[in-house]
Amino acid sequence: MSQPFDADTPNIDAPAIAPLTTDPVPEPFEVKFASRVDRLPPYMFGRINNSLYQKRRAGDDVIDLGMGNPSDPPDPTVIQKLHDAASDPGNHGYSKSNGIANLRKEVASKYNRQYGVRLDPDSEIIACLGSKEGFSHMCLALMGPGDTAMIPSPYFPVHMYGVILASGNVVALDVADPDRFLRNVAYTCEHMAPKPKILIVNYPHNPSSAVIEPDFFVEVVRLAKKYKFMVIHDFAYADVAFDGYQPPSFLSAPGAKDVGVEFTTMSKGYNMAGWRVGFCAGNSEMIRGLGTIKGYYDYGMFQAIQIAAIVALRETEASVEKQSMIYQGRRDVLVSGLRRLGWNLTPPKAGMFVWAEVPEPWKSKMSTMDFAMKLLEEGNVAVSPGSGFGNAGEGYLRMSLVENEQRLRQAVRQIAKCLSTSGAPTSNATT
Ligand SMILES: Cc1ncc(COP(=O)(O)O)c(C=O)c1O
């Protein structure tokens, strides 16, 4: 076991040096990044985002189905509570980095109410500055050089790069078919030495919208105990589901707390993405590891936000359900519109995205990135190319349901026009 860092290192006490009589020859100053930054690839959505920005500056009305950034406001009760809490002078100091006790208690009540899961708010729940922050720091708490995480593929970028930034390695497993995914988890554990340390799962999945049934997590727990890996479930889309489907919580599988944690967020279902409120719940040792890192890095969320988040969790369930219905309506509009154009896609049962295969002949003739650029430049519709989520996403587009139904109908018309007027490509002109 490594020793705690000895902070009691001697101070340097240099002797006085004579001042320089001539100025040194100026040389260009070079900023050298740490190797962990050099391991990161160029940002895949940079090209799309640049073009989107230029178009908007030029006054074009681009329909943006790119980022999963909710465009509807939170429930008015929550905004009012934020206003009131922000007016209280007692709420402006540093808060607790693991979240105030009443917020953690409210999360425990929600887990009990919704999933029948009992959690100790003190040791089994921690608040994060959005689940992405919590997830990244959890990777830092658990992973290091030589450690491997199994992640879903295609992947939400932080599932890959949270591990890479923590100096770990990644094995990516196809997420589309849950049974196959589990078989691949077992196979990887049987054949890899040293064995993977972590399994990262994410259902409803971003970007592919894949979903699972509760039995899936029973098997995950069994495998975790057998092969001794820890589990992190990213449950960002817990609150956004359609047609009666209820996304299961990993923590409701028997024994889940022995092996892992689950991240939830108020960004999606509660329309509070900019507020940065997320939670990690489950295994108390893993939570303690995350809390230790967070204690060094942050001072917690603005307290007024935490107080308003309590009200959101306690009083606005109906708004969360209504928001799911709104996404369901948008899903229907987009899926039926694209199907009329001959696109091949499965309507998602949950989440905020339609994952659509690029139609032929474009799929065989150009990269997904070029196809997405074409829709943006010629059709004024921004989408995320699947390749931004790893090679397994090539050939797919992710379209987010953040624009209203009328704008989605318009998007389908613009896509149809852009693809019909430009004609199908005849050669592999764009690489
Ligand atoms: C799968 C997944 N996890 C985490 C996040 C980030 O959520 P938060 O806003 O809580 O950081 C997102 C946001 O798009 C997501 O899609």
Image (cartoon, helix red, strand yellow):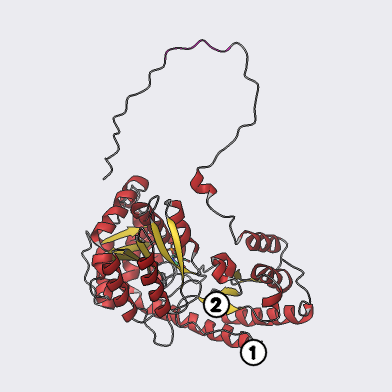
Classify 10 Å Cα crowding around label 1: few (below 14), some (14-19), many (20 and above): few
| 22 or 69: nearer the viewer | 22
Query: Viewed as shown, does residue 374 lie left or right of 355?
Result: right
Label 2 residue near ligand 1, CB within 8 Å: no
Q: Quadrant of ligand 1?
A: bottom left
- The residue wearing badge 2 is 355
The residue at 28%/77% (across/down) is 115
Q: Is mark 1 within 8 Å of ligand 1?
A: no
Which region shows up in magenta? 15-20
Q: SS class of the residue under badge 1?
A: helix
Where disc 2 sits, the SS reads strand
Give the number of callouts.
2
Q: Quadrant of the N terminus?
A: top left
Q: Quadrant of residue 387?
A: bottom right
102 or 425: nearer the eye? 425
Residue at the image position 57 percent from the left and 82 percent from the top? 405
Image location (x, y in percent) of residue 265? 39, 66
Residue sitting at 56 percent across and 67 percent down? Answer: 391
Mark 2 crowdedness (10 Å alpha carbons): few <14, some 14-19, many ≥20: many
**For this view, does 323 lie left or right of residue 51?**
left
Instruction: Please indicate whether residue 33 sits to the left or right of residue 363 in the image.
Output: left
Q: Nearer the viewer, residue 63 or 191?
A: 191
Residue type indicated by callout 1: Arg
Residue 309 x %, y %: 35, 64
7 magenta-colored? no
Amino acid at the residue labelled 2: Trp
- Quadrant location of the C terminus in the rendered image: bottom right
The residue labelled by disc 1 is: 340
